[in-house]
Image (spheres, rainbow, N blue to C red):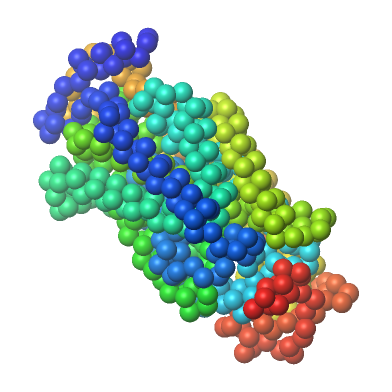
């Protein structure tokens, strides 16, 4: 059945129910105002790249390109960190998670009350106290070269898998509401992102993040507020959600339960600590501030900003349930999967406002561009300093040219990889599983170095290897095994539609999505098996393995010959209790250079 027949069939079939909930999703298309909003957003991003690349250009050095000469401002860095924690996937799937499984995911947000103090007092001071601008340098100074290489490879592999997905999903959403070829829009948007990242460096990345964060905050807040008003107010939203079990907090300790207070709060503490404080794409921006005081202030602002925007994102999911509690668009056939609910909801709630579809698509793209630009900039720095610089004669001009070339190549890769992402609808599940493999290992090995004075290179390397191998096995072997039941929904107030589900499928449903193998309940209960572990525990288990292996091996194995322990490489909260004397370490070249410049 062609698109025009589907659209006309839907238009004639959709009937308002008692509450006027279901509306024609075919209206969710772009007009001239929407195009103007979207193009304006892209022009701002490109304009910032032009400004910092050609008119407000600093010295032609790697320090300027990667860290803004360590003269970045506190507030823009904080906003940039908030923007980069969101992706187009998050904007669309977090509300769907709240709609389908209830409030338990919100404890990912609550965990910021633990994460920010960890970053302020345990992690970030170590980087500043040792003049470390590449977080993986720390692993070489504290442990050995092998541990550094292991973690940089894990970082690069994860980023290479994620970047094409981050930019492809919103590009596909845009294609579906405009009819423009998906690969054309993917190429245009990637080109703009490459342009401002390549020429403007970290300054362009940060300031485009500021603009994009403003778009995201406006869009997410407006959709949530207007949705609540349509339902009848916040009180009514929470009344309906409570009756529908969406506000029930699951306090079970069952490791196989998909989403509980415990697995969301604990694993998100590990995941966000790893991503914000131990991931080069974020650390690069944090250490671009002039002092530790500025970094701490920026992280506090980041915490408040992150909680605010994620609160509205989660709240939107609860509002969606209140809106559709008696006519579930999934069961009614208006959308085929939960991760399509957000575009449907936007059209339903604000589709009558001119330009709002354009604002929403701009919001999704803003989230994707922010993540992509930060990833490309940090990836270029890692590849150059870890794998190219040791084999060439280094000059600042050559380094900058090389890193800009790497950004360009990464952008081309994202465009080409879009043709692969298009074919595999389960790619998102694979990407998030890989994140579960690496985040636990990253958290464990860095904290092992910062908190355990006796830890040494041999122990850390084998602990990280053990964690990754075990998690690769669990993640790989459990694919397709675990099934989770969604909370109950209803279609009792839906209009009577004498048509099949397939005839109600909108063009938006052509978007690839994470396979909903988690939409079914378990067929049988055969007792606990490690492969039945909820994916929300992956990061926690990965970190536990690092400590469980690394601490004993630190006492069983002898340190490498010539290994030296420096108390400055420990977290400030541990330094008073360290029982070894201050020693000079064999610093890697990047650290020596940074100290010489300062």
Looking at the rendering, in which quadrant would you find the C terminus? Answer: bottom right
Residue 443 located left or right of residue 323: right
- 102 above or below 253? above
Q: Residue furthest front?
A: 55
Q: Is residue 57 left or right of residue 559?
A: left
Q: Residue at x 67, y 75 (%)?
A: 597
Residue at (56, 50) in percent of width and height: 199
Image coordinates of residue 291 in percent, x first then y, are: 52, 77
- The quarter of the image holding the N terminus is top left
Q: Position of residue 213 (x, y in %)?
A: 38, 53
Q: Residue at x 31, y 39 (%)?
A: 37
Q: Is residue 498 above or below residue 65?
A: above
Out of 252 and 266, give the one closest to the viewer: 266
Residue 274 seen in render: no
Q: Can residue 432 be seen by looking at this rendering?
A: yes
* Between 102 and 210, the one nearer to me in the picture: 210
């Amino acid at each position: 059945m062609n698109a025009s027949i589907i659209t006309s069939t839907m238009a004639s079939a959709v009937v308002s129910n008692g509450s006027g909930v279901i509306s024609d999703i075919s209206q969710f298309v772009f007009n001239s105002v929407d195009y103007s909003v979207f193009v304006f957003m892209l022009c701002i991003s490109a304009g910032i790249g032009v400004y910092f690349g050609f008119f407000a250009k600093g010295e032609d050095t790697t320090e300027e390109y990667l860290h803004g000469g360590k003269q970045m401002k506190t507030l823009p860095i904080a906003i940039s960190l908030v923007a980069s924690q969101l992706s187009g996937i998050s904007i669309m799937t977090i509300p769907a998670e709240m709609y389908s499984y209830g409030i338990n995911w919100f404890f990912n947000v609550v965990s910021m009350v633990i994460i920010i103090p960890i970053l302020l007092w345990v992690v970030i001071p170590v980087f500043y106290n040792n003049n470390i601008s590449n977080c993986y340098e720390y692993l070489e100074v504290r442990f050995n070269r092998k541990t550094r290489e292991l973690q940089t490879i894990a970082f690069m592999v994860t980023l290479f898998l994620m970047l094409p997905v981050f930019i492809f999903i919103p590009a596909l959403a845009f294609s579906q509401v405009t009819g423009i070829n998906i690969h054309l829009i993917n190429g245009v948007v990637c080109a703009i992102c490459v342009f401002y990242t390549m020429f403007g460096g970290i300054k362009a990345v940060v300031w485009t993040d500021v603009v994009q964060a403003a778009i995201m905050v406006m869009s997410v807040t407006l959709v949530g507020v207007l949705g609540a008003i349509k339902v009848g107010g916040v009180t009514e939203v929470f009344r309906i959600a409570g009756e529908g079990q969406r506000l029930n907090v699951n306090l079970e300790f069952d490791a196989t339960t998909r989403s509980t207070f415990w697995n969301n709060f604990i694993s998100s503490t590990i995941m966000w600590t790893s991503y914000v404080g131990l991931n080069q794409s974020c650390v690069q921006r944090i250490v671009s501030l002039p002092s530790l005081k500025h970094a701490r202030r920026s992280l506090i602002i980041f915490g408040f900003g992150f909680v605010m925007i994620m609160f509205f994102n989660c709240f939107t999911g609860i509002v969606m349930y209140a809106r559709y509690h008696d006519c579930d668009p999934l069961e009614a056939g208006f959308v085929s999967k939960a991760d399509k609910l957000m575009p449907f909801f936007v059209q339903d709630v604000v589709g009558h406002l001119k330009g709002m579809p354009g604002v929403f698509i701009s919001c999704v793209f803003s989230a994707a561009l922010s993540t992509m630009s930060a990833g490309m900039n940090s990836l270029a720095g890692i590849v150059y300093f870890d794998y190219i610089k040791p084999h060439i004669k280094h000059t600042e001009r050559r380094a900058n040219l090389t890193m800009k070339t790497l950004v360009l190549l990464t952008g081309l890769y994202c465009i080409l990889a879009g043709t692969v992402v298009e074919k595999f609808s389960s790619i998102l599940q694979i990407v998030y599983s890989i994140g579960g493999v690496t985040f636990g290992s990253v958290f464990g090995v860095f904290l092992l170095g910062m908190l355990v004075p006796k830890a040494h290179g041999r122990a850390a390397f084998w602990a990280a290897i053990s964690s990754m191998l075990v998690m690769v096995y669990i993640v790989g072997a459990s694919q397709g095994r675990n099934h989770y039941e969604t909370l109950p929904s209803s279609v009792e107030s839906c209009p009577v539609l004498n048509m099949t589900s397939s005839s109600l499928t909108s063009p938006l449903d052509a978007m690839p999505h994470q396979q909903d193998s988690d939409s079914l309940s378990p067929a049988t209960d055969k007792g606990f098996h490690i492969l039945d572990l909820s994916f929300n525990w992956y990061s926690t288990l990965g970190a536990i393995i690092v400590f469980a292996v690394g601490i004993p091996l630190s006492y069983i194995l002898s340190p490498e010959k010539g290994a030296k322990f420096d108390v400055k490489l420990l977290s400030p909260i541990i330094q008073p209790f360290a029982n070894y004397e201050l020693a000079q370490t064999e610093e890697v070249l990047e650290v020596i250079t940074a100290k010489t410049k300062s």
